[in-house]
Image (cartoon, helix red, strand yellow):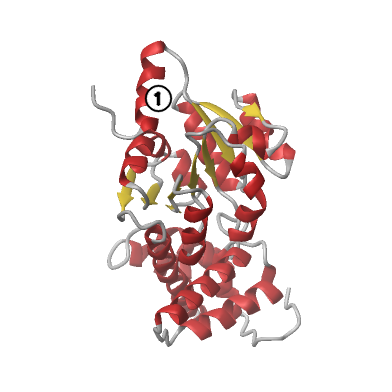
């Protein structure tokens, strides 16, 4: 049998021998924990690490191996990570740790980061790096509905396909350039950000008119805008339900800034970008940085101008 990528060969050999393939997972927030759980369910031997040790407790109870440090997860040879931002990736995947990694080490980075950072990590990993940001919230992961965007070396991606498919329902490949998947992810998030603000404005108009915002959300999902964004976030906004967060307002602001940074690099003017950044900055400062990012609707609902004190 001809193998495409050494990881695929190793995976096939392990399967033939009845052994479990080892995978490391670093970063156990809501998304990371759900994704690592999918790997456990698929039969992988998963070594997990998080800065907050207790985040690993439930996964360890399900059979995961608790790593004392990121080095132990990296030592598995194949590591997925879901860290909050690119600085966190730099702090974990240091030059010293990468130098000590196994020869066939590969890092699958699921974080939403800038394309520039993806190019940096690809170089620092000597090409043993796959960009794989994701679309979906934790419930989608658990239900097997996560969508994964992937870019990087095609042979590397082919070897990692079984792992990615264990976590999501579909893997969209965007070519060999490591930064491509991150540009796609930022563009998707920018669409969601617009949808959140549009929902907030429309719901506020309806509430001021004395109408039922919940019925409005039900109607648009049954007609023009079916789907997770207008349905899930629309219901959250209509009922002001922002906890537990699937994705926080603080992280949403990070993504707005990443989008604007990319636009500046490309020489593209985004007319609504600065306005959306102001809205997210106000939401983070005055509504709650750790609430779900749908809470940006409260900026319009409460008519909060930038710099006002917290309106509760």
Q: What residue would you read off at disc 1?
A: 10
Camera-nearest residue between 104 and 279: 104
Camera-nearest residue between 90 and 275: 90
Quadrant location of residue 143? top left
Camera-nearest residue between 207 and 170: 170
Residue 216 is situated, as x and y percent measured from the top left of the image, at: 40, 69
Residue at 59% x, 47% y is 30
Q: Residue 60 vs residue 309: left or right?
A: left
Q: Is residue 169 visible?
A: no
Q: How many marks?
A: 1
Farthest right residue in view: 309
Farthest left residue in view: 1
Q: Residue 152 vs residue 139: left or right?
A: left
* Rendered view: 147 above or below 305: above
* Rendered view: 144 above or below 284: above
Q: Secondary structure at mark 1?
A: helix
Residue 172 is situated, as x and y percent measured from the top left of the image, at: 31, 50
Image quarter where the N terminus lies is: top left
Quadrant location of residue 186? bottom left
Residue 16 is situated, as x and y percent measured from the top left of the image, at: 36, 14
Quadrant location of residue 181? bottom left
Image quarter where the C terminus lies is: bottom right
Residue 284 is situated, as x and y percent measured from the top left of the image, at: 66, 72
Camera-nearest residue between 248 and 161: 161
Residue at 65% x, 25% y is 61
């Amino acid at each position: 049998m001809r193998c495409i990528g050494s990881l695929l060969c190793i995976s096939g050999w392990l399967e033939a021998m009845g052994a479990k393939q080892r995978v490391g997972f670093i970063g156990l927030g809501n998304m990371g924990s759900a994704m690592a759980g999918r790997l456990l369910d698929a039969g992988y031997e998963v070594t997990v690490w998080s800065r907050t040790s207790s985040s690993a407790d439930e996964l360890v109870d399900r059979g995961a191996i608790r790593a004392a440090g990121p080095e132990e997860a990296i030592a598995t040879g194949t590591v997925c990570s879901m860290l909050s931002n690119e600085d966190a990736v730099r702090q974990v995947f240091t030059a010293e740790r990468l130098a000590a990694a196994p020869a066939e080490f590969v890092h699958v980075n699921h974080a939403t980061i800038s394309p520039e950072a993806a190019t940096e990590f690809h170089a620092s990993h000597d090409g043993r790096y796959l960009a794989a940001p994701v679309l979906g919230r934790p419930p989608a992961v658990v239900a097997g509905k996560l969508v994964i965007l992937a870019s990087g070396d095609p042979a590397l991606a082919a070897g990692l396909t079984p792992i990615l498919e264990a976590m999501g329902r579909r893997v969209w490949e965007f070519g060999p350039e490591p930064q491509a998947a991150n540009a796609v992810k930022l563009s998707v998030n920018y669409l969601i950000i617009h949808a959140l603000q549009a929902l907030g404005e429309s719901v506020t108009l309806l509430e001021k008119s004395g109408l039922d915002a919940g019925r409005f959300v039900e109607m648009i999902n049954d007609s023009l805008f079916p789907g997770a964004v207008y349905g899930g976030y629309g219901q959250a906004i209509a009922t002001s339900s922002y906890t537990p967060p699937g994705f926080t307002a603080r992280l949403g602001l990070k993504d707005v800034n990443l989008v604007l940074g990319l636009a500046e690099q490309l020489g593209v003017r985004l007319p609504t970008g600065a306005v959306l950044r102001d809205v997210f900055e106000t939401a983070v400062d005055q509504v709650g940085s750790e609430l779900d990012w749908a809470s940006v609707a409260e900026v319009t609902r409460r008519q909060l101008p930038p710099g006002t004190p917290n309106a509760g």
